[in-house]
Amino acid sequence: MEMKMGMRLGMQQRLVMTPRLQQALKLLQMPTLELQQVLKQEILQNPLLEEVDDVLDTADEEKEEKEEEEPKEPANKDDQDEWDEFYDSAWSSGGNPEVEEREDFVERVPVARQTFAEYLFSQLRLATEDDKVLELGDYIIGSLDDSGYLTCPLEDIARTFGAELGEAEKVLKLIQTFDPPGVGARDLRECLLIQLEAKGLGDSMAAGIVRDDFDDFKQRKYLDLTRKLKISLKEMQVQAGIIGSLNPKPGLDVIAESPKYVIPDLVVERVGEKYVIYLNDRNVPRLRISQSYKDELQSNPDISEETKDFIQGRLKNAKWLIQTIEQRRRTMIKVMESIVEEQAEFFEKGTASLKPLTLQQVASKINMHESTVSRVTTNKYVQTPRGVYELKFFFSSALGTQSGEEVSAKSAKLNIKNIIEKEDPKRPLSDQKIADILEKDGLIIARRTVAKYREQLGILPARHRKQY
Protein backbone atom coordinates (compact mmCIF):
# COMPACT_ATOMS: atom_id res chain seq x y z
CA MET A 1 0.00 0.00 0.00
CA GLU A 2 1.42 3.35 -1.02
CA MET A 3 1.51 6.11 1.62
CA LYS A 4 1.88 9.78 0.74
CA MET A 5 1.13 13.20 2.13
CA GLY A 6 -1.70 15.33 0.80
CA MET A 7 -4.40 17.88 1.56
CA ARG A 8 -8.15 17.53 1.43
CA LEU A 9 -11.15 19.67 2.27
CA GLY A 10 -13.81 18.36 4.65
CA MET A 11 -16.62 19.46 6.97
CA GLN A 12 -17.49 18.19 10.40
CA GLN A 13 -19.63 19.21 13.38
CA ARG A 14 -18.18 19.52 16.85
CA LEU A 15 -18.91 21.30 20.10
CA VAL A 16 -16.50 24.15 20.81
CA MET A 17 -16.22 25.83 24.21
CA THR A 18 -15.90 29.46 23.29
CA PRO A 19 -14.37 31.88 25.82
CA ARG A 20 -17.79 33.43 26.43
CA LEU A 21 -19.39 30.05 27.04
CA GLN A 22 -16.63 29.17 29.50
CA GLN A 23 -17.16 32.44 31.33
CA ALA A 24 -20.92 31.90 31.42
CA LEU A 25 -20.42 28.47 33.03
CA LYS A 26 -18.07 30.00 35.61
CA LEU A 27 -20.64 32.67 36.48
CA LEU A 28 -23.31 29.99 36.84
CA GLN A 29 -21.20 28.02 39.30
CA MET A 30 -20.14 31.02 41.42
CA PRO A 31 -21.68 31.50 44.90
CA THR A 32 -23.38 34.84 45.51
CA LEU A 33 -20.51 36.45 47.43
CA GLU A 34 -17.98 35.55 44.75
CA LEU A 35 -20.32 36.80 42.01
CA GLN A 36 -20.65 40.10 43.86
CA GLN A 37 -16.88 40.65 43.72
CA VAL A 38 -16.67 39.65 40.04
CA LEU A 39 -19.41 42.08 39.01
CA LYS A 40 -17.80 44.94 40.93
CA GLN A 41 -14.57 44.20 39.08
CA GLU A 42 -16.43 44.20 35.75
CA ILE A 43 -17.90 47.63 36.57
CA LEU A 44 -14.39 48.97 37.07
CA GLN A 45 -13.08 47.44 33.83
CA ASN A 46 -16.01 48.24 31.53
CA PRO A 47 -16.96 51.97 31.46
CA LEU A 48 -20.29 51.17 29.81
CA LEU A 49 -21.49 49.24 32.87
CA GLU A 50 -22.89 51.04 35.86
CA GLU A 51 -24.64 49.97 39.03
CA VAL A 52 -28.32 50.80 39.40
CA ASP A 53 -29.10 52.82 42.51
CA ASP A 54 -32.29 52.06 44.39
CA VAL A 55 -33.34 55.70 44.46
CA LEU A 56 -32.72 58.10 41.58
CA ASP A 57 -31.70 61.67 42.35
CA THR A 58 -34.44 64.23 41.80
CA ALA A 59 -32.30 65.95 39.22
CA ASP A 60 -31.94 62.74 37.24
CA GLU A 61 -35.68 62.15 37.34
CA GLU A 62 -36.41 65.67 36.10
CA LYS A 63 -33.83 65.22 33.35
CA GLU A 64 -35.43 61.97 32.22
CA GLU A 65 -38.91 63.56 32.22
CA LYS A 66 -37.62 66.49 30.17
CA GLU A 67 -36.02 64.15 27.65
CA GLU A 68 -39.32 62.28 27.31
CA GLU A 69 -41.15 65.56 26.63
CA GLU A 70 -38.53 66.79 24.13
CA PRO A 71 -37.16 63.75 22.32
CA LYS A 72 -34.02 64.23 20.29
CA GLU A 73 -33.26 62.64 16.96
CA PRO A 74 -30.16 60.43 17.44
CA ALA A 75 -27.13 60.72 15.16
CA ASN A 76 -27.66 57.12 14.11
CA LYS A 77 -31.11 55.53 14.28
CA ASP A 78 -29.75 51.96 14.46
CA ASP A 79 -27.51 52.89 17.36
CA GLN A 80 -30.50 54.47 19.14
CA ASP A 81 -32.57 51.28 18.83
CA GLU A 82 -29.69 49.21 20.15
CA TRP A 83 -29.18 51.48 23.15
CA ASP A 84 -32.89 51.67 23.99
CA GLU A 85 -33.11 47.88 23.98
CA PHE A 86 -30.52 47.39 26.68
CA TYR A 87 -30.34 50.62 28.66
CA ASP A 88 -33.31 49.82 30.89
CA SER A 89 -32.69 46.06 31.02
CA ALA A 90 -31.17 46.08 34.49
CA TRP A 91 -31.58 42.52 35.64
CA SER A 92 -33.92 41.95 38.53
CA SER A 93 -32.45 41.36 41.96
CA GLY A 94 -34.53 38.21 42.18
CA GLY A 95 -35.58 39.13 45.70
CA ASN A 96 -38.91 38.66 47.36
CA PRO A 97 -41.28 41.07 45.58
CA GLU A 98 -42.76 41.96 48.97
CA VAL A 99 -39.36 43.11 50.21
CA GLU A 100 -38.51 46.36 48.49
CA GLU A 101 -35.81 47.73 50.76
CA ARG A 102 -32.22 46.86 49.94
CA GLU A 103 -30.19 45.84 52.94
CA ASP A 104 -26.79 47.42 53.43
CA PHE A 105 -24.01 44.85 53.55
CA VAL A 106 -21.58 45.43 56.40
CA GLU A 107 -18.37 43.57 55.76
CA ARG A 108 -16.88 41.91 58.80
CA VAL A 109 -13.34 43.05 59.40
CA PRO A 110 -11.20 39.99 60.20
CA VAL A 111 -9.70 40.12 63.66
CA ALA A 112 -5.99 39.34 63.89
CA ARG A 113 -5.54 35.98 65.59
CA GLN A 114 -2.48 34.91 67.57
CA THR A 115 -0.63 32.03 65.93
CA PHE A 116 0.13 28.79 67.74
CA ALA A 117 3.86 29.63 67.92
CA GLU A 118 3.18 33.16 69.20
CA TYR A 119 0.86 31.77 71.86
CA LEU A 120 3.55 29.38 73.16
CA PHE A 121 6.39 31.87 72.92
CA SER A 122 4.43 34.41 75.01
CA GLN A 123 4.21 31.75 77.73
CA LEU A 124 7.94 31.03 77.38
CA ARG A 125 8.85 34.69 77.96
CA LEU A 126 6.76 34.70 81.12
CA ALA A 127 8.36 31.47 82.34
CA THR A 128 12.02 32.51 81.96
CA GLU A 129 14.34 35.41 81.13
CA ASP A 130 17.37 33.24 80.35
CA ASP A 131 18.60 34.10 76.85
CA LYS A 132 19.88 30.56 76.18
CA VAL A 133 16.57 29.01 77.24
CA LEU A 134 14.64 31.53 75.15
CA GLU A 135 16.80 30.74 72.11
CA LEU A 136 16.42 26.97 72.49
CA GLY A 137 12.72 27.28 73.34
CA ASP A 138 12.01 29.47 70.33
CA TYR A 139 13.59 26.87 68.03
CA ILE A 140 11.69 24.00 69.68
CA ILE A 141 8.39 25.89 69.39
CA GLY A 142 9.12 26.55 65.73
CA SER A 143 9.64 22.81 65.22
CA LEU A 144 6.15 21.87 66.44
CA ASP A 145 3.51 20.84 63.90
CA ASP A 146 -0.08 22.05 63.90
CA SER A 147 -1.12 19.26 66.27
CA GLY A 148 1.51 20.33 68.81
CA TYR A 149 4.02 17.49 68.30
CA LEU A 150 7.79 17.97 68.07
CA THR A 151 8.83 17.02 64.53
CA CYS A 152 12.60 17.54 64.87
CA PRO A 153 14.81 15.13 66.93
CA LEU A 154 15.89 16.77 70.17
CA GLU A 155 19.48 15.64 69.53
CA ASP A 156 19.59 17.69 66.31
CA ILE A 157 18.27 20.77 68.11
CA ALA A 158 20.91 20.47 70.84
CA ARG A 159 23.65 19.97 68.23
CA THR A 160 22.48 23.06 66.29
CA PHE A 161 22.99 25.30 69.32
CA GLY A 162 26.03 23.48 70.71
CA ALA A 163 24.12 22.57 73.85
CA GLU A 164 24.00 19.40 75.91
CA LEU A 165 21.10 17.03 75.30
CA GLY A 166 20.09 17.45 78.93
CA GLU A 167 19.75 21.22 78.48
CA ALA A 168 17.46 20.78 75.47
CA GLU A 169 15.49 18.18 77.42
CA LYS A 170 14.91 20.66 80.27
CA VAL A 171 13.66 23.34 77.87
CA LEU A 172 11.34 20.81 76.23
CA LYS A 173 9.98 19.76 79.64
CA LEU A 174 9.33 23.43 80.37
CA ILE A 175 7.37 23.82 77.13
CA GLN A 176 5.39 20.68 77.96
CA THR A 177 3.97 22.48 81.00
CA PHE A 178 2.42 25.17 78.80
CA ASP A 179 -1.17 25.47 77.69
CA PRO A 180 -2.72 23.53 75.98
CA PRO A 181 -1.80 20.39 77.97
CA GLY A 182 -0.01 17.83 75.82
CA VAL A 183 1.90 20.30 73.68
CA GLY A 184 5.56 19.52 72.92
CA ALA A 185 5.10 15.74 72.98
CA ARG A 186 7.16 13.53 70.69
CA ASP A 187 4.49 10.86 70.23
CA LEU A 188 0.89 10.10 71.19
CA ARG A 189 1.85 8.16 74.34
CA GLU A 190 3.84 11.10 75.71
CA CYS A 191 1.05 13.53 74.75
CA LEU A 192 -1.52 11.56 76.77
CA LEU A 193 0.82 11.19 79.75
CA ILE A 194 1.43 14.95 79.84
CA GLN A 195 -2.32 15.56 79.91
CA LEU A 196 -2.88 13.02 82.67
CA GLU A 197 -0.10 14.66 84.68
CA ALA A 198 -1.76 18.06 84.21
CA LYS A 199 -5.03 16.59 85.54
CA GLY A 200 -3.24 15.24 88.62
CA LEU A 201 -3.56 11.65 87.36
CA GLY A 202 0.14 11.01 86.77
CA ASP A 203 0.12 8.02 89.17
CA SER A 204 -3.32 6.71 88.24
CA MET A 205 -4.19 3.39 86.65
CA ALA A 206 -5.01 5.19 83.40
CA ALA A 207 -1.48 6.63 83.30
CA GLY A 208 -0.05 3.15 83.98
CA ILE A 209 -2.03 1.70 81.06
CA VAL A 210 -0.77 4.41 78.72
CA ARG A 211 2.79 4.07 79.98
CA ASP A 212 3.14 0.27 80.05
CA ASP A 213 0.35 -1.27 77.93
CA PHE A 214 -0.42 1.34 75.32
CA ASP A 215 -0.13 -1.04 72.34
CA ASP A 216 -2.69 -3.47 73.83
CA PHE A 217 -4.96 -0.56 74.71
CA LYS A 218 -4.86 0.82 71.15
CA GLN A 219 -5.85 -2.60 69.81
CA ARG A 220 -8.69 -2.73 72.38
CA LYS A 221 -7.44 -5.96 73.97
CA TYR A 222 -9.47 -5.21 77.06
CA LEU A 223 -9.80 -8.84 78.18
CA ASP A 224 -6.02 -9.28 78.16
CA LEU A 225 -5.59 -6.06 80.12
CA THR A 226 -8.19 -7.04 82.73
CA ARG A 227 -6.34 -10.30 83.40
CA LYS A 228 -2.98 -8.54 83.56
CA LEU A 229 -4.17 -5.70 85.79
CA LYS A 230 -6.56 -7.95 87.76
CA ILE A 231 -9.53 -5.65 87.35
CA SER A 232 -13.08 -6.10 86.07
CA LEU A 233 -14.24 -5.25 82.56
CA LYS A 234 -16.36 -2.47 84.04
CA GLU A 235 -13.31 -0.90 85.70
CA MET A 236 -11.34 -1.31 82.48
CA GLN A 237 -14.09 0.56 80.65
CA VAL A 238 -13.90 3.39 83.20
CA GLN A 239 -10.14 3.72 82.60
CA ALA A 240 -10.70 3.62 78.84
CA GLY A 241 -13.21 6.45 79.23
CA ILE A 242 -10.63 8.55 81.11
CA ILE A 243 -8.02 8.00 78.41
CA GLY A 244 -10.58 8.55 75.65
CA SER A 245 -11.45 11.98 77.08
CA LEU A 246 -7.91 13.26 76.38
CA ASN A 247 -7.05 15.30 73.29
CA PRO A 248 -4.68 13.53 70.86
CA LYS A 249 -4.06 16.78 68.92
CA PRO A 250 -3.91 19.62 71.47
CA GLY A 251 -2.39 22.14 69.07
CA LEU A 252 -5.51 22.24 66.91
CA ASP A 253 -7.46 23.84 69.78
CA VAL A 254 -5.24 26.93 69.51
CA ILE A 255 -4.87 27.29 65.74
CA ALA A 256 -8.51 26.62 64.95
CA GLU A 257 -9.62 28.90 62.15
CA SER A 258 -12.28 31.54 62.60
CA PRO A 259 -15.78 30.24 61.88
CA LYS A 260 -16.79 30.51 58.24
CA TYR A 261 -20.20 32.07 57.86
CA VAL A 262 -22.47 30.66 55.19
CA ILE A 263 -24.44 33.19 53.16
CA PRO A 264 -27.36 31.35 51.50
CA ASP A 265 -27.67 31.90 47.76
CA LEU A 266 -31.37 31.06 47.74
CA VAL A 267 -34.20 31.48 50.23
CA VAL A 268 -37.30 29.30 50.55
CA GLU A 269 -40.14 30.78 52.59
CA ARG A 270 -43.57 29.43 53.32
CA VAL A 271 -46.41 31.78 52.40
CA GLY A 272 -49.76 30.26 53.25
CA GLU A 273 -49.83 26.76 51.77
CA LYS A 274 -47.09 27.41 49.21
CA TYR A 275 -43.32 27.81 49.27
CA VAL A 276 -41.91 30.97 47.70
CA ILE A 277 -38.38 30.85 46.26
CA TYR A 278 -36.18 33.84 45.59
CA LEU A 279 -32.49 34.67 45.28
CA ASN A 280 -30.63 36.15 48.20
CA ASP A 281 -28.77 38.60 45.98
CA ARG A 282 -29.91 41.98 47.24
CA ASN A 283 -26.28 42.98 47.71
CA VAL A 284 -25.19 41.90 44.24
CA PRO A 285 -24.77 44.91 41.93
CA ARG A 286 -27.66 45.41 39.50
CA LEU A 287 -26.26 46.39 36.13
CA ARG A 288 -27.34 48.58 33.23
CA ILE A 289 -25.73 50.38 30.30
CA SER A 290 -24.27 53.78 31.18
CA GLN A 291 -26.49 56.72 30.20
CA SER A 292 -23.51 59.06 29.72
CA TYR A 293 -22.23 57.10 26.72
CA LYS A 294 -25.69 57.06 25.23
CA ASP A 295 -25.77 60.87 25.53
CA GLU A 296 -22.32 61.12 24.00
CA LEU A 297 -23.35 59.21 20.88
CA GLN A 298 -26.50 61.31 20.55
CA SER A 299 -24.91 64.73 21.02
CA ASN A 300 -21.64 64.23 19.15
CA PRO A 301 -22.13 63.30 15.48
CA ASP A 302 -18.43 63.85 14.80
CA ILE A 303 -17.28 61.09 17.12
CA SER A 304 -14.31 59.19 15.65
CA GLU A 305 -14.67 55.67 14.27
CA GLU A 306 -12.02 54.40 16.71
CA THR A 307 -13.98 55.73 19.68
CA LYS A 308 -17.20 54.39 18.24
CA ASP A 309 -15.69 50.93 17.75
CA PHE A 310 -14.42 51.00 21.33
CA ILE A 311 -17.86 51.89 22.66
CA GLN A 312 -19.59 49.28 20.50
CA GLY A 313 -17.17 46.58 21.68
CA ARG A 314 -17.73 47.43 25.34
CA LEU A 315 -21.44 47.61 24.65
CA LYS A 316 -21.53 44.03 23.35
CA ASN A 317 -19.62 42.81 26.41
CA ALA A 318 -21.95 44.69 28.75
CA LYS A 319 -25.07 43.36 27.01
CA TRP A 320 -23.75 39.82 27.13
CA LEU A 321 -22.92 40.08 30.86
CA ILE A 322 -26.37 41.44 31.75
CA GLN A 323 -28.04 38.67 29.75
CA THR A 324 -25.83 35.99 31.33
CA ILE A 325 -26.54 37.14 34.88
CA GLU A 326 -30.26 37.20 34.16
CA GLN A 327 -30.04 33.69 32.70
CA ARG A 328 -28.14 32.55 35.83
CA ARG A 329 -30.90 33.94 38.03
CA ARG A 330 -33.65 32.16 36.09
CA THR A 331 -31.73 28.89 36.03
CA MET A 332 -31.11 28.87 39.79
CA ILE A 333 -34.76 29.64 40.54
CA LYS A 334 -35.86 26.92 38.12
CA VAL A 335 -33.61 24.28 39.70
CA MET A 336 -34.68 25.19 43.25
CA GLU A 337 -38.37 25.12 42.30
CA SER A 338 -37.88 21.59 40.97
CA ILE A 339 -36.09 20.53 44.17
CA VAL A 340 -38.85 21.95 46.38
CA GLU A 341 -41.47 20.19 44.30
CA GLU A 342 -39.67 16.85 44.47
CA GLN A 343 -38.80 17.14 48.18
CA ALA A 344 -42.10 18.59 49.36
CA GLU A 345 -42.36 16.03 52.19
CA PHE A 346 -38.94 17.07 53.52
CA PHE A 347 -40.10 20.67 53.95
CA GLU A 348 -43.19 19.41 55.75
CA LYS A 349 -41.78 16.61 57.94
CA GLY A 350 -37.97 16.77 57.95
CA THR A 351 -34.99 14.61 56.94
CA ALA A 352 -36.77 11.32 57.59
CA SER A 353 -39.06 12.11 54.63
CA LEU A 354 -36.25 12.98 52.22
CA LYS A 355 -36.77 11.23 48.88
CA PRO A 356 -34.06 9.82 46.62
CA LEU A 357 -33.22 12.36 43.93
CA THR A 358 -30.58 12.58 41.20
CA LEU A 359 -29.24 15.43 39.11
CA GLN A 360 -30.55 13.69 36.00
CA GLN A 361 -34.12 13.71 37.35
CA VAL A 362 -34.05 17.45 37.92
CA ALA A 363 -32.30 18.08 34.59
CA SER A 364 -34.95 16.10 32.69
CA LYS A 365 -37.78 17.88 34.47
CA ILE A 366 -36.58 21.39 33.62
CA ASN A 367 -35.17 20.47 30.18
CA MET A 368 -31.54 21.23 30.99
CA HIS A 369 -28.30 19.29 30.83
CA GLU A 370 -27.23 17.38 33.92
CA SER A 371 -23.92 19.29 34.04
CA THR A 372 -25.84 22.59 34.24
CA VAL A 373 -27.79 21.36 37.27
CA SER A 374 -24.53 20.17 38.81
CA ARG A 375 -22.98 23.63 38.42
CA VAL A 376 -26.04 25.31 39.91
CA THR A 377 -25.97 23.07 43.01
CA THR A 378 -22.20 23.16 43.62
CA ASN A 379 -21.02 25.26 46.60
CA LYS A 380 -24.41 26.90 46.99
CA TYR A 381 -26.69 27.00 50.02
CA VAL A 382 -30.39 27.56 50.57
CA GLN A 383 -32.14 28.95 53.62
CA THR A 384 -35.32 27.02 54.41
CA PRO A 385 -37.80 26.98 57.31
CA ARG A 386 -35.89 23.90 58.54
CA GLY A 387 -32.44 25.47 58.42
CA VAL A 388 -29.64 26.24 55.97
CA TYR A 389 -28.63 23.37 53.68
CA GLU A 390 -26.21 22.86 50.83
CA LEU A 391 -28.10 22.20 47.61
CA LYS A 392 -26.29 18.88 47.21
CA PHE A 393 -27.99 17.76 50.45
CA PHE A 394 -31.25 17.20 48.58
CA PHE A 395 -29.66 14.65 46.21
CA SER A 396 -29.02 11.07 47.32
CA SER A 397 -29.18 7.50 46.08
CA ALA A 398 -32.22 5.28 46.46
CA LEU A 399 -32.90 2.20 48.58
CA GLY A 400 -35.77 -0.19 47.88
CA THR A 401 -38.64 -1.03 50.22
CA GLN A 402 -40.96 -4.00 50.47
CA SER A 403 -43.84 -1.84 49.26
CA GLY A 404 -41.94 -1.03 46.06
CA GLU A 405 -41.29 2.60 46.97
CA GLU A 406 -37.82 4.11 47.22
CA VAL A 407 -36.19 5.68 50.27
CA SER A 408 -33.34 8.18 50.37
CA ALA A 409 -29.96 7.00 51.65
CA LYS A 410 -29.92 10.01 54.02
CA SER A 411 -33.21 8.83 55.50
CA ALA A 412 -31.72 5.35 55.98
CA LYS A 413 -28.70 6.83 57.78
CA LEU A 414 -31.02 8.73 60.13
CA ASN A 415 -32.91 5.51 60.92
CA ILE A 416 -29.63 3.67 61.64
CA LYS A 417 -28.50 6.48 63.96
CA ASN A 418 -31.82 6.44 65.83
CA ILE A 419 -31.71 2.65 66.25
CA ILE A 420 -28.17 2.74 67.69
CA GLU A 421 -29.05 5.61 70.06
CA LYS A 422 -31.91 3.53 71.52
CA GLU A 423 -29.97 0.24 71.81
CA ASP A 424 -29.00 -1.35 75.12
CA PRO A 425 -25.34 -0.30 75.68
CA LYS A 426 -24.66 -3.63 77.38
CA ARG A 427 -25.94 -5.49 74.34
CA PRO A 428 -25.20 -3.33 71.27
CA LEU A 429 -26.76 -4.33 67.99
CA SER A 430 -24.64 -5.82 65.24
CA ASP A 431 -24.87 -4.54 61.67
CA GLN A 432 -26.90 -7.61 60.70
CA LYS A 433 -29.41 -7.05 63.51
CA ILE A 434 -29.79 -3.41 62.46
CA ALA A 435 -30.43 -4.58 58.89
CA ASP A 436 -33.08 -7.02 60.18
CA ILE A 437 -34.82 -4.26 62.17
CA LEU A 438 -34.89 -2.02 59.11
CA GLU A 439 -36.24 -4.85 57.00
CA LYS A 440 -39.10 -5.34 59.48
CA ASP A 441 -39.88 -1.66 59.01
CA GLY A 442 -40.03 -2.25 55.27
CA LEU A 443 -36.56 -1.05 54.22
CA ILE A 444 -34.51 -3.54 52.20
CA ILE A 445 -30.84 -3.00 53.06
CA ALA A 446 -27.77 -5.28 53.14
CA ARG A 447 -25.50 -5.70 56.17
CA ARG A 448 -22.55 -4.25 54.23
CA THR A 449 -24.61 -1.16 53.43
CA VAL A 450 -25.45 -0.73 57.12
CA ALA A 451 -21.73 -1.01 57.97
CA LYS A 452 -20.86 1.58 55.31
CA TYR A 453 -23.48 4.07 56.54
CA ARG A 454 -22.47 3.47 60.18
CA GLU A 455 -18.85 4.27 59.36
CA GLN A 456 -19.92 7.42 57.49
CA LEU A 457 -21.81 8.48 60.62
CA GLY A 458 -18.64 7.95 62.71
CA ILE A 459 -20.20 5.19 64.84
CA LEU A 460 -18.03 2.33 66.14
CA PRO A 461 -18.82 -1.38 65.56
CA ALA A 462 -20.92 -3.24 68.15
CA ARG A 463 -17.93 -4.83 69.94
CA HIS A 464 -16.46 -1.38 70.56
CA ARG A 465 -19.76 0.17 71.67
CA LYS A 466 -20.34 -2.42 74.36
CA GLN A 467 -20.40 -1.15 77.93
CA TYR A 468 -20.10 -3.23 81.10
Image (cartoon, rainbow, N blue to C red):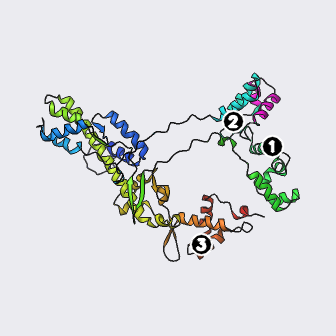
Q: Is residue 428 above or below residue 150?
A: below
Residue at horizontal 59 percent and vertical 35 percent from the top: 113
User: What's under tag 3, amino acid-wise?
Assistant: Leu
Left or right placement of residue 261 versus residue 44 in this view = right
For disc 3, the neighbor class at 10 Å (few under 14, some 14 to 19, many from 20) is many
| Cα distance between the residues tagged 3 and 2 | 48 Å
- Dot 1 falls on a residue whose secondary structure is helix
Labelled disc at residue 197: 1
Under mark 1, the amino acid is: Glu
Mark 2 burial class by Cα count in 10 Å: few <14, some 14-19, many 20+? many
Residue position marked by numbered label 2 in the rendering = 144
The foreground one among 279 and 117 is 279
Tag 3 secondary structure: helix
Q: Which corner quadrant of the image does residue 227 belong to?
A: bottom right
Instruction: State the extent of the magenta-drawn residues as a range.
Output: 155-175
Please tell me in which quadrant of the rendered image residue 165 appears: top right
Q: Is residue 359 above or below residue 154?
A: below
Q: Which mark is residue 438?
A: 3
| Mark 1 or 3, closer to the camera | 1
- Mark 2 to mark 1 CA distance (whole Å): 21 Å
- Which residue is most to the right? 230
Decide whether the magenta segment is chiefly helix, strand or loop: helix
